[in-house]
Amino acid sequence: MRTFYLTTPLYYVNAKPHLGHTYTTVVADCLSRFRRMLGDDVCLLTGTDEHGQNIERAAAALEITPKQLADRNAAEYQKLWARLGIEYDQFIRTTESRHYAGAAEVFKRAFDSGAIYKGEYSGWYCISCNLFAPESNTPPNCEVCGRPTERVTEESYFFRLSDFQQALLDHYEKNPKFIMPVSRRNEVVNFVSGGLKDLSISRTSVKWGIPVPGDKNHVIYVWFDALVGYLTGIGFGAENSSEQFHKYWPAQIQLVGKDIIRFHTVYWPAFLMAAGLELPRQVFAHGWWLKDEVKMSKSRGNVIDPHVLLTHFGSDAVRYFLLREVPFGLDGTFSYEAFIQRVNGDLANDYGNLVSRTLTLISKNFGNLMPYPSAIEGRTSLDKEVEATALATVETYQAHMGNLAFSNALESVWELLARANRYLNESAPWALTDNSKERPRLATILYTAAEVIRIATVLLTPVLPQSCRRVWEQLGLKIPLKLQRINEIKWGGLPVGSSLGELSPIFPRLDKKIVIDKILQETGDEATVKDPELERPRTTSHPKSAKIQPVAAPASEPEAGRNGPQEPKITIDDFAKVELRVAQVISAERVPGADKLLKLTVDVGSEVRQILAGIAKAYAPESIVGRKIVIVANLQPRKMRGLESNGMLLAASVGDEGRPVLATFLEDVPNGARLK
Ligand code: MSP
């Protein structure tokens, strides 16, 4: 039996998963189900990347230990995968003991081969991406995420990446499919051709990590540590690697987002070469899900919570949308409108309707039993053409799936469904009566339509496992759907004379407006709200007072009576809902065309965010860089002048003009500290 090992990235545990993370895992699950239905012995690995400064800082901001944060968010990932029906074989957490031994072993092997040496490093480092930036006099922004970098100087172990330049280029050349899609391959080849610098692969200032073997002052660089998870998750260990490791390694496909391609196609293969291990056969980099035209990410505050989608639409709809909407490899924009369009148009209308009208007619005319088609010679050219289309679709679908062209594969099945719907319209079985003359024709038409449904359902199982199981049951089929072999599909597999299951609609149609309004209400998402330029609330009713208030409060906020006796008091629980945190201004600039606005980048300890504030008349941008301020950290993101504001800063509003004076601290306080 052919083995097929495939992996998702190991996700950072600094936050809960969002739709972007969901994407890679859904794709991986669909691909592994497809390979299983070809008869392969599949191993799907996913997991979490739990060490490093990023996690250390996020935990400190929450006043919990890194392990507590890792436990909490690893569980969030597992909970989400269960809701999405992800059937993984291995979930590796890089804090597990089975991982420690293997990570140290790969380090040791690379060290023993001469690929690692000790030196000193000084450079600009991005703590979010765990990546050093090229040298420069001023702090550059990270090449990957664009956030500001920090200066780091320390003793370090180095990996002789420069020595691997030629070996990597040779590998890319000899294995043209090692990096996919081709556009990404070209990027990587250009990058490596430009020369490689040795890589710092240990840290002394970080404690949350795996110790370097034989040198406890250092922990292994988090990317080195995490990448090795692909090996330890299937049993690579210190002494004897397990049978499972030998069976599955090297991976057939490693799925990653385009932001982490360099780690997987330059560093990772070099680490493996140094340790004397085989390289994965392919690394495939997909695009990003965007929201409001930028990458969906927690720090930008524009994430879609997969649980909201699961609650409203169910797991199959989420899986279908992610796989169908965007060609794999390209970026895609998420919108609820497009999502519901897919559910109503593709699932409810095209697939759901075909199933329901075909099976209802069978039930009505043939007492719930699958009808016998008339003898072969009785079949018309129309019937034969539908059969030929179905069999051609099986081939096209497999070719697309083999190239990870999921959207095209689904499109081909939808062409088949459309053909079958047209076939029903053209042959109008509802107009045929139950008399003995018309009955054979009626049986053939309905059998042909039902057979298309059976074939399409087998093909759709990797994408829509739950719904397909229900259609299968309604078709009255008893053989487990999962045991169907996609590469062995033949026409005529429906057992005639068998009873249908209980019929019920599979995909209910949704009312777009009602559902979207409900979701927006629940999530407080402002996707459809257009904000005019932000105004500070007027304070004319209290000219002498100086009241601390969020500077970016909406203009419409009611002002009168704020301090009046009739204003109800809030409880301590109400206050606790407001998350006030210390943030440090990293950069500030004016917003063209908005004379009151400053665009700030602030460090909130666990993350860097953008905030827009109406303080431009009181503060020059350069005067507030480096200042520690107070922000409302759990406010829904808002858009102003096309820019996103992810939080509000607090300032006193002074005098008739309501001049803002920033709230600040006399003592030094860490970024992210909560005000209570
Ligand atoms: N921990 C590293 C990976 C180590 S693998 C040994 C990491 N983690 S991550 O949680 O930041 O990202 C994991 C994956 O999620 C990446 O492949 C990334 O591309 C993907 N996505 C995160 N946001 C995304 C979108 N908005 N859209 C699509 N995928 C994105 O990197």
Image (spheres, helix red, strand yellow):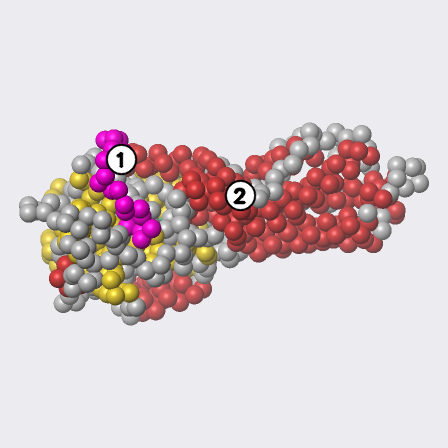
Q: Give the range drawn in magenta.
A: 553-576
Whether 376 is among the magenta residues is no
- Residue, disc 1: 566
Give the residue type that dot 2 points to: Ile
Secondary structure under badge 1? Answer: loop
Q: Quadrant of residue 184?
A: bottom left
The tag on residue 514 is 2
Of 377 and 78, nearer the camera is: 78
Residue 485, quarter of picture: top right
Q: Quadrant of the C terminus?
A: top left
The reply, left or right, for residue 492 in relation to residue 161 is: right
Q: Which residue is pictured at 18% across the width and 40% down the height? A: 674
Nearer the N terminus, badge 2 or badge 1?
2
Magenta region includes residue 562: yes
Number of numbered discs present?
2
Query: Residue 105, relative to residue 119: is it above or below?
Result: above
The x, y position of residue 417, in whole percent, is 68, 49
| Category of crowding for the residue at label 2, using alpha-carbon neighbours closer than 10 angstroms: few (below 14), some (14–19), many (at least 20) | few
Q: In this view, does 181 lie above or below 525?
A: below
Whether residue 11 sits left or right of residue 209 in the image: it is right
Quarter occupied by residue 208: top left
Q: Which amino acid does label 1 sit on?
A: Gln
Q: Is residue 622 above or below residue 354?
A: below
Residue 241 visible to the viewer:
no
Q: Position of residue 263 (x, y in %)?
A: 31, 55
| Residue at x 72%, y 53% (from the top left corner) | 419
